[in-house]
Amino acid sequence: MWKVLPLLAALFAVAACASPQAATPAATQTTSLQRNAESLQAKLRRSPQDASAWAQLGTTHVELARVTFDPQHHSRADKALTESLRLRPDGNGEAFIGRGALANAQHDFAAAREWGLRAAAALPDSASAQGVLVDALTQLGDDAGASVALQRMLDLRPGVASFSRAAYHFELHGRMDDARGAWERALESASSPDEVAFCRLHLDELEGRADKSLETSRGLVSKVPSPEHLVQYGEALDRAGKSAEARVQYDLALQQLRALGGDDLTAALIAADHGDPVEALRFAEKEWAKRQSVFTADALAWALHVNKRSAEALPYSDRAVALGWRDPDVLRHREAILGALR
C-alpha cells in the first residue's frame, strides 16, 4: 500500500528511484491514438452494440483533442460516449470516466466531479475514475478532496498517471524537490516511448520555469505547442526584443483557446499581460464564477491589479499562495500587487 497523503513525501521513502492532465509530445502519441481509434471503429462496425468499445472510442477522442488541439475530437467523443450510455445507461463506469474526462477537458469541472463520483461508485477499483476526480477537485479548489482521490489513485495504480498527478499536487504546495522526485518516479514507471517522452518533457518543463531562456522555451513549444508553452515562448521573445514574433505566439495561443473553448483562465492571463485589461477581468470573473481554485484566484488578482484595483486584488492573491504554491509568475503578480499598496 502506498501511503502518500497527507505527507506526500512518503512516496519517495518506499524506494530510491517517476494534465492535469498534461500534453505529451504530439507526433508519436497522435499516431498511437489514431490507430487505437481506427481499431475501435473497425470493431464497432462488426459489433455496433458494444457499449464498452463506444466508451473507449469516446475516451480516445478526448485524448486526441488534447494532443492535437482539434476541437472536432470533442464532438466525436461526445457522440461515442452518448451512444455507449444509450446502450448501457446504468453502471457504465467506462462511459462515466469518458464523460468526466471530456468535462474536465472542456473546463466544466463541476460536471466532471459528478461523472467522476459516478465512475468511482460503478468502478471502485478504477484508478482512472480517481484521476477524473483528482483533476476536477483540484480545479474546483477542493484540495482536501483532491488529496483523498490522489491517495486512492496511488494505492490502486502507482504508475505514470498517478505519479504525474502527485507531482502536480506537490508543486501546488510549493514542494518543488518532491515534484521533481515524483516526475522521476513517473519516468521509472514509464512502459512506452510515449510515456517516457511525456515524463522527460515535464521534467524539462519544471527546469524551464527557472530557465526562462529563449532556447528552452522554443524547445518546449517544438515538443508541445500548447497555449501555455506558446505564451512562455512569446514572453522569452519579448525579453529578447522580438516583440512582433512574440505577438504571433500570443495570437496562436488565443486561437487555440477559442478553438477548444472553455479556458477563460489562460485567456485572462494572456489578456492581462499582453492585451486588454478590461477583457482580462471579464475572462477572470467568468472563470471564478465556475471554480474557486488557486489558479483562478491568481488570475482574478492579476486582472484586478492591471485594472488598477490592487486593494481588491490582494485577498485573491492571498488565496492563490495559501497552499504554498510558489510559481514564479504567481509570485511576480503578488509582488506587483503588494508594491502598488505600499
Image: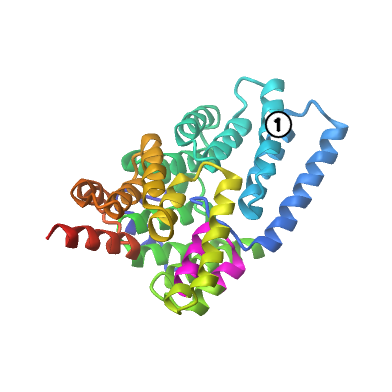
- Tell me if mark 1 has few (under 14), some (14-19) or many (20+) residues whose alpha carbon lies within 10 angstroms of its own: some
Residue located at (49% from left, 68% from top):
234
Instruction: Determine whether, in the image, residue 315 is placed left or right of residue 131.
Output: left
* Image quarter of residue 23: bottom right
Residue 18 in sight from this viewpoint: no
Q: Nearer the viewer, residue 112 or 8?
A: 112
* Image quarter of residue 78: top right
Q: Write the start and end of the magenta stretch as one range.
A: 219-236
Q: Nearer the viewer, residue 46 or 271?
A: 271
Instruction: Determine whether, in the image, residue 68 is placed left or right of residue 112.
Output: right
41 in magenta? no
Q: Nearer the viewer, residue 5 or 141?
A: 141
Q: Position of residue 316 (x, y in %)?
A: 25, 47
Q: Is residue 291 above or below residue 235?
A: above
- Amino acid found under the numbered disc labelled 1: Lys
Q: Mark 1 highlights which residue?
A: 79
Q: Position of residue 143 (x, y in %)?
A: 33, 43
Residue located at (63% from left, 54% from top):
67
Q: Nearer the viewer, residue 21 or 191?
A: 21
